[in-house]
Amino acid sequence: MTYKYLEARSDRASGELTIIGTRIRIAQIINMLANGYTIEQLQEGWPWLSVTVLQGAVEEATELLSATVHA
């Protein structure tokens, strides 16, 4: 499956899933959301990422997790 916002590269973040072109791990984003942060607060911390990119990355991670659970 090809993703628009996520990638896993062995030369970045130890191969963990990150937002394309960054070292920002999607696991970190999900953890922060689970701890009460909003997408807008995350965007303030990473101003070079748009709200659209952050939301898209979370949606893709959700799809990936759902596909994994149902496989």
Image (cartoon, helix red, strand yellow):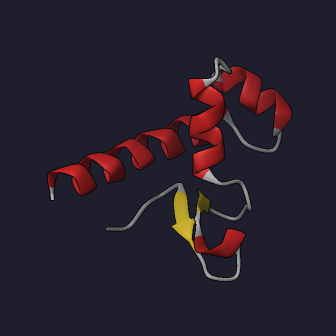
Quadrant position of the N terminus in the picture? bottom left
The residue at the point 64 percent across, 25 percent down is 39
Image: 44 above or below 66: above
Q: Give the side of residue 24 with respect to residue 47, left or right.
A: left
* Image quarter of residue 38: top right
Q: Give the side of residue 24 with respect to residue 60, left or right.
A: right
Image: 32 above or below 7: above
Question: Which residue occupies the extreme bottom position in the image?
Answer: 11
Image: 63 above or below 5: above
Q: Nearer the viewer, residue 50 or 46?
A: 46
Q: Give the side of residue 28 with respect to residue 48, left or right.
A: left
* Image quarter of residue 3: bottom left
Q: Nearer the viewer, residue 69 or 8?
A: 69
Q: Nearer the viewer, residue 61 or 68?
A: 68
Q: Nearer the viewer, residue 52 or 15?
A: 15
The residue at the point 81 percent across, 44 percent down is 48
Residue 61 image position (x, y, % from top left): 43, 48
Question: Which residue occupies the extreme left position in the image?
Answer: 71
Total numbered circles? 0
Quadrant position of the C terminus in the picture? bottom left
* Image quarter of residue 25: bottom right
The residue at the point 75 percent across, 31 percent down is 43
Image: 40 above or below 49: above
The residue at the point 60 percent across, 74 percent down is 15
